[in-house]
Structures are given as structure tokens and as C-alpha cells.
Image: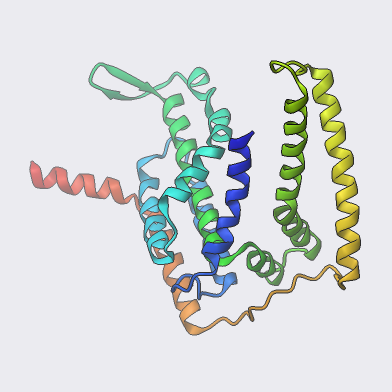
Amino acid sequence: MAKIESAFFDLSYLDALARRNTCIHRLDPRIKVIATAVFVICVVSFHKYAISAMLPFALVLVLVMGLAEVPASYVARKLLIVSPFAVMVGIFNPLLDHQPLMQLGPIVISGGWISFFSILLRFSLTVSAVLLLIASTGFNAVCMAMVKLGMPRIFAVQLLMLYRYIFVLVDEGIRIHQARALRSFQKRGLSMKTFSHLVGQLLLRTLDRAQRIHLAMLCRGFDGTIRIQRVFTITKGDLFFLANCCTVLFLLRYFDLPLYIGRLLTRLLS
């Protein structure tokens, strides 16, 4: 439970990163949202056996990470936390796809293993891109940018409330878990019946806290509109960044750069 607590509350570090002043931070949030969407679409559009062709996209993330001054160790830790979901998605591929596609000496690698590693690579690239977007923009600005780009306001408000109060929910769950642990003897009382009671108590506390939060928001004039201090203005520099970013991403998508480099090296060495 302590690991879960530290993992969730460490997300607030994203807000601290978003307050930095770099060339990436100064870009208009709408430009960064569009660039991230193009990046994600390019990555997920590769065929299921693609691995090497997606590696240049990692270099793009490393470049943006350096310009935005986002620690690579922080992004890596977040990837490790959510990586079990990607593993569960592709873990059965090696069992279902036995077609041999690659041979490394005496070792024959089937298509299932290649597609499994391809899923892990796609997951790492897309999640890292979203983390970089939030770390260089702020979640409030991201939601506002998506509203200005045409997303329904109610959906953006729901995302903002989820991000804002997930910490409150985790805090309630941690307190319930600690209370049960202090009242148990030698870790007894972990039956499914006890677990269901704890979940019921968490639901009741969540509903009560949500009602009090909603009343407090109404008393402070909340009308469903996201408001931030920053004024959105798209400059020529923002458009220049978006045009160059999309050009590079499309070139990396339709031209297999590692393949061309490999062929070039083969010709030079032969």
C-alpha cells in the first residue's frame, strides 16, 4: 500500500514540472496536443510486427524530453508502474502465433514474440508522449486546449475532476487499509467478506466527500467552465514547430530509417 501511495502522490510532481520555463513549455497547449496526437497516431499505425521502424520515435521523445527538462528517470518509473497492463495485453501472443519470422543463430523467434515486443514498444512510446505533454503543459491547460479543439466541455471537466480528486480517493483507501491493519492480529481478517465491507465503506466515504466537494465548488461560483490564468495565443513560432514536428513524424512513419541505414552500412562494408 505504501508503494501505491507514493506512486499516486508522486503524480503531483507533473504539476511542478509544468511550471518550468523552457521552449517546449512556452508553446501553445493546442499545438502540443495536436503534435502529441499525431505522434500517437503514427506509432499505433505500424503493423503488428514492426519494431525497428518505431525506434526513431524514441529519439524524438528523448529530444523533447531534453528540451523540456523532464527527468528521464521519472518517466521510466511511471512506465514501470503501468507496464503490467501492456504485458497482460500481449502475453498470449507467443502462445497463439507460432509462425517463425526471425532466426538468431540456433534460436528461432516466432511472430508472437515479435508482436509482443512491438506492443510493449508502442505502449512505452505513447505513454511517454502523454506524460511529456502533461509535464510540459499541465493537466488543466491540456483539458482547456482539448475543449478549444472541439472536445465536449463535460468530458474535459470529468477528466479534470478525475485527475484532481484521484488523490483524495487514494487517501481514503489508504486510511481504511491502515485502520484495518491496526485492528487485525497477525494479518488476519483478509477474507473476501472483509474486503467487500471495506469497499462498501470506501464507496460511502467517496459519495459523502464528493457531495461536500460539489457544494463547496458551487459556493465558489463553479459553473462547469475550466478557467486558467494563461491566455492561449498561437504564434508563428508555434505553427513553425507544429509544421516541422508533423513533417518529421510523417517522414519517420513512411520511411523505415533503420532499414535504410542498415542497407547503407551493408553496401559500405561489402
Image location (x, y in percent) of residue 215 = 91, 61
Q: Is residue 103 above or below residue 62?
A: above
Compare residues 257 and 91 and report the one nearer the observer: 91
Q: Quadrant of residue 195?
A: top right
Image location (x, y in percent) of residue 130 = 55, 55
Compare residues 266 and 125 and report the one nearer the observer: 125
Compare residues 88 and 38 and report the one nearer the observer: 88
- Work out whether residue 12 can be spotted: yes
Horizontal arrangement in the rendering, residue 224 relative to residue 99 (left or right): right
- Work out whether residue 37 can be spotted: no
What colour scheme was applied to this rendering of the protein?
Answer: rainbow
Quarter placement of the N terminus: top right
| x 78%, y 35%: residue | 176
- Counting labels gives 0
Horizontal arrangement in the rendering, residue 27 relative to residue 215 (left or right): left
Horizontal arrangement in the rendering, residue 28 relative to residue 211 (left or right): left
| x 67%, y 65%: residue | 140
Q: Is residue 223 above or below residue 62?
A: below
Compare residues 119 and 225 and report the one nearer the observer: 225
Q: Is residue 73 above or below residue 188?
A: below
Q: Quadrant of residue 92?
A: top right
Image location (x, y in percent) of residue 89 = 58, 31
Horizontal arrangement in the rendering, residue 172 relative to residue 47 (left or right): right
- Furthest residue in direction left, as rendered: 270
Quarter placement of the C terminus: top left
Image location (x, y in percent) of residue 88 = 57, 28
